Image (spheres, rainbow, N blue to C red):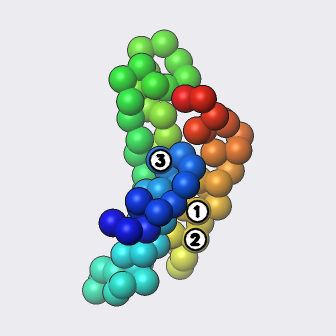
Amino acid sequence: MQAFENTPGHLSLRLLAALEAGQRAGGDKRGMQSAAMLIVKKDGGPWLHNDVVLRLQVDDNPSPIDELRRLVEKAVKQFRLGAGR
């Protein structure tokens, strides 16, 4: 909770910080293989009547959270997430 609350920026960055903190605290006892993020907001998507702000998924990766971070950072920059939205 603290990582989420103390991370500035777009919701995707805050969620990612919480995911990383959970992993540092012990994570899932089954290990890591995939990671995903879905953020929705009524009419928040880029197309008409689309609620999906961000949908990212990493499958079958030895470091899925690291790869998800790369994708989130790219999306925040590319789509200007958090810039007046």
Tag 1 residue: 69
| SS assignment at label 3 | helix
Rounded to the nearest whole Å, what is the CA distance between mark 3 and mark 1? 13 Å
Tag 2 residue: 66
Residue farthest front in this picture: 6
Please, is residue 69 above or below residue 48 in the view? Answer: below
> Residue 58's spot in the image, x, y percent?
50, 60
Give the residue at x 64% y 61%: 70
Residue 84 image-quadrant placement: top right
Rounded to the nearest whole Å, what is the CA distance between mark 2 and mark 1? 5 Å
Tag 3 residue: 11
| SS assignment at label 2 | helix
Give the residue at x 40% y 26%: 51
Residue 67 appears in the rendering: yes
Q: Mark 3 against mark 1, which lies toward the viewer?
A: 3
Residue type for callout 3: Leu
Residue type for callout 1: Arg
- Left or right: residue 72 compared with residue 30: right
Q: Given contact means CB atoms under 8 Å apart, are the residues at marks 3 and 1 in contact?
A: no
Rounded to the nearest whole Å, what is the CA distance between mark 2 and mark 3? 17 Å
Give the residue at x 55% y 29%: 85
> Residue 75's spot in the image, x, y percent?
63, 45
